[in-house]
Image (spheres, helix red, strand yellow):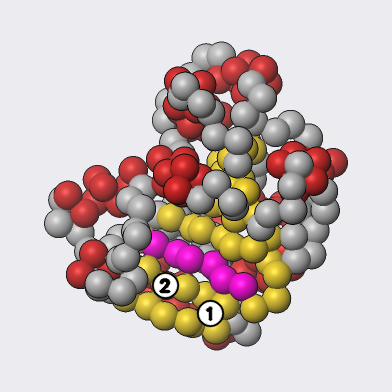
């Protein structure tokens, strides 16, 4: 998702307390310094406008959430939604950051769970390393996740999903479970929170794929 450049988006991000600045300085200290507790931290990489992570945070106040988005113009929408809330969520913050450098901002075993939703497909072979479920990214997730913990990946893009399934063993990770039709799977769909893209593509009749990866 790349919205047109929105003038002033960077200023809003610089000014809001919902968005964490200089995240590198918080490596190893997120729970205590940002959330001021010891609760587990779940992150969504490529959160877009934030619908999914905001609903998760509402439902699970005992978990700390960090939404990561590369582009200011997209992140701005999430910030505006938080600002419009009567009681902004205390267990959710945002970062404008490129996840390629995610190991610069989180320490070993600092993260309890990672969500990837409708990640950009980067269809050209030469861009495969940029795909968020690539083996290069899985290696980064392994560095920051607690041992044995998981990445949850959803997409309607079958090529990207099959790519992820191939990458899992190549990365030395383990496929815990997969479905090619999430919304018809009573077990995996239980408590499912739809993202913006999931609502859009499933309303067009696309099936949603999901897998859980133990890295
Ligand atoms: N997750 C949302 C959803 O399902 O509705 C948005 C999906 S959109 C197709 C993918 C998002 O991931 C875009 O907003 C894009 O800017 C972001 N993104 C892509 N690569 C990223 C990266 N390396 N680091 C952080 N965000 C990234």
Give the camera-side residue of 4 and 181. Answer: 181
Give the camera-side residue of 139 and 88. Answer: 88
Q: Nearer the viewer, mark 2 or mark 1?
A: 2
Would the CB of label 2 be found within 8 Å of ligand 1?
no
Give the camera-side residue of 60 and 158. Answer: 60
Residue lying at 56% horizontally and 14% vertically, measured from the top left: 8
Residue 174 position by quadrant: bottom right
Q: Quadrant of the N terminus?
A: top left
* Residue 22 against residue 98 in the figure, above or below: above
- Magenta stretch encompasses residue 151: yes
Residue lying at 45% horizontally and 64% vertically, measured from the top left: 153
**Callout count:** 2
- Say left or right for 72 vs 159: right
The x and y percentages for residue 109 are 75, 66
Circles 2 and 1: CB distance less than 8 Å? yes
Segment colored magenta: 149-154
Residue 41 position by quadrant: bottom right
- Magenta stretch encompasses residue 101: no
Would the CB of label 1 be found within 8 Å of ligand 1?
no
Q: Secondary structure at mark 1?
A: helix
Q: Secondary structure at mark 2?
A: strand
Alpha-carbon span between mark 2 and mark 1: 10 Å
Residue on which disc 1 sits: 168
Residue lying at 78% horizontally and 35% vertically, measured from the top left: 22
- Say left or right for 60 vs 106: left
Mark 2 or mark 1: which comes first in sequence? 1
Residue 211 numbered tag: 2
The x and y percentages for residue 47 are 49, 45
Q: Is residue 41 visible?
A: yes
User: Label 2 crowding class (10 Å Cα cut-off): few <14, some 14-19, many 20+?
Assistant: many
């Amino acid at each position: 998702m790349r919205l047109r450049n929105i003038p002033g988006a960077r200023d809003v991000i610089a000014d809001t307390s919902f968005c964490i600045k200089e995240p590198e300085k918080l490596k190893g200290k997120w729970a205590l310094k940002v959330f001021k507790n010891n609760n587990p931290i779940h992150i969504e990489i490529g959160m877009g406008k934030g619908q999914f992570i905001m609903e998760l945070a509402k439902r699970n106040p005992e978990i700390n959430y960090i939404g990561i988005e590369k582009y200011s113009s997209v992140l701005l929408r999430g910030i505006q939604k938080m600002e419009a809330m009567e009681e902004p969520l205390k267990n959710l913050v945002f970062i404008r950051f490129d996840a390629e450098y995610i190991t610069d901002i989180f320490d070993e075993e600092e993260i309890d769970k990672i969500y990837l939703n409708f990640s950009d497909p980067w269809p050209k072979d030469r861009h495969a390393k940029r795909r968020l479920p690539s083996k290069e990214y899985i290696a980064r997730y392994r560095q920051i996740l607690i041992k044995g913990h998981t990445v949850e990946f959803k997409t309607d893009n079958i090529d990207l999903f099959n790519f992820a399934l191939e990458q899992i063993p190549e990365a030395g990770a383990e496929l815990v479970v997969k479905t090619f039709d999430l919304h018809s799977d009573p077990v995996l769909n239980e408590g499912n929170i739809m993202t913006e893209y999931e609502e859009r593509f499933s309303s067009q009749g696309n099936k949603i794929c999901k897998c859980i990866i133990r890295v």
